[in-house]
Amino acid sequence: MSAESERKTDVIPQWKQEEVDTVVDILNSYESVGVVNLAGIPSRQLQAMRRDLHGTAQLRVSRNTLMNRALDETDDDLSELKEFIEGQVGLIGTNDNPFGLYKELEASKTPAPINAGEVAPNDIVIPEGDTGIDPGPFVGELQQVGADARIQDGSIQVLSDSTVLEAGEEVSTQLANVLSELGIEPKEVGLDLRGVYSDGVLFDPEDLAIDIDDYRADVQAAASAARNVSVNAVYPTAQTAGLILGKASNEARSLGLHAAVESPDIADTLVGKADSQMRALAALIDDEEALPEELRGADLTAPAGDDEDDADDDESTDDQAADADAEADTDDDEDDDDDDGGDALGAMFG
């Protein structure tokens, strides 16, 4: 091809260039740009979808060649989206993140009847129950498409859930008529996101189709594990400093009680422990003459609370230290974490 013919090819009519400029301006004004499939969407429903998207996203439908040219002329390199420009498609722009866009488009889909010749997007099932249709030839039509149908109690009934077509198979005219008569709409109509480009990353629909509840649970489990590591490794952070100090305090108290360290902080507990141990020992002596005078005839039962709380202080303080470890797995300090995590997930998934 000569250079002159190439120059002629590059020259496009004014109206086409204006359309390209309009599409470029739209794409440059949004943080996320995607390609959506429009095949099979009736014009009326497409217009309704445009209205529903107003304020959150903008849909632009143009010729594929012009959309390809516009993708080449945007400020960001959106040429990777050109691989999705095939068939009946449109460009969609939004300032929401890709996860939020995908979630919104999926939520906007509505049930629709399926026509003869279309491929079933999923298994088509005629549910068990009363069809509400009077006895007649329709029962034979149901049986011919594979439904477990009988005439009972004065009407046509389906006796069990019947899979009449598997996903990927073509819908026959007879099945389409039966489904229409029953009011079954086995497919969803909506904008299918083929790909979206945001912050220099190209996302496929499979990347965006995640279970938010599962994802949130994974994040919370990771946060809990990180707190455990921080506490056990004595690596202080703003979220774990209090837990680490509490654990250290309990361990120091336990050590002081075991070693009988004369510290003002545990002096009362040490005295109570010694008193409980003395009373327990004295209670084992049968010969009252062997007891010190001040204990003869005295009630050797430990004062209320001392026997449990002081004599067993070694174990209780060990438990407290263990509890400080366990707190890393509890929700005591998760309020702030959960709030921050919730905000972050909200921002991520819209």
Image: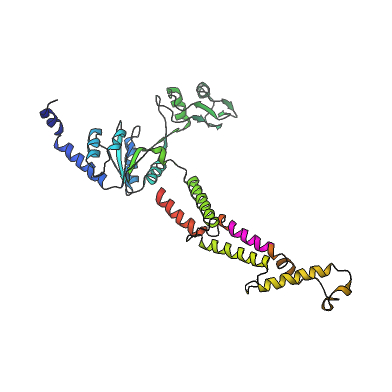
Where the N terminus falls, by quadrant?
Answer: top left
Residue extending farthest bottom: 294
Q: Residue at x 11, y 29 (%)?
A: 3
From this viewpoint, is residue 350 visible? no
> Left of 5 or right of it: where is 51?
right
Q: Is residue 59 above or below residue 268?
A: above
The x and y percentages for residue 350 are 40, 49
Q: Which residues are magenta?
A: 315-325
SS assignment for the magenta stretch, majority: helix
Q: Nearer the viewer, residue 47 or 236?
A: 236
Q: Is residue 114 left or right of residue 302?
A: left
Q: Is residue 223 above or below residue 140?
A: below
Q: Is residue 32 on the magenta stretch?
A: no
Identity of the residue drawn at 12% across and 30% down: 8
> Who is closer to the viewer here, 333 or 74?
333
Q: How is the image coloured?
A: rainbow
Q: Is 318 within the magenta?
A: yes
In the visual, does 86 lie left or right of 279? left
Viewer-side residue, 268 vs 201 = 268
- Find residue 62 and report its horizontal and vertical position in percent: 25, 36
Residue 313 in the image: x percent, y percent? 69, 65
For the question of whether residue 51 can be seen, the reply is: yes
Residue 286 vs 59, above or below: the answer is below
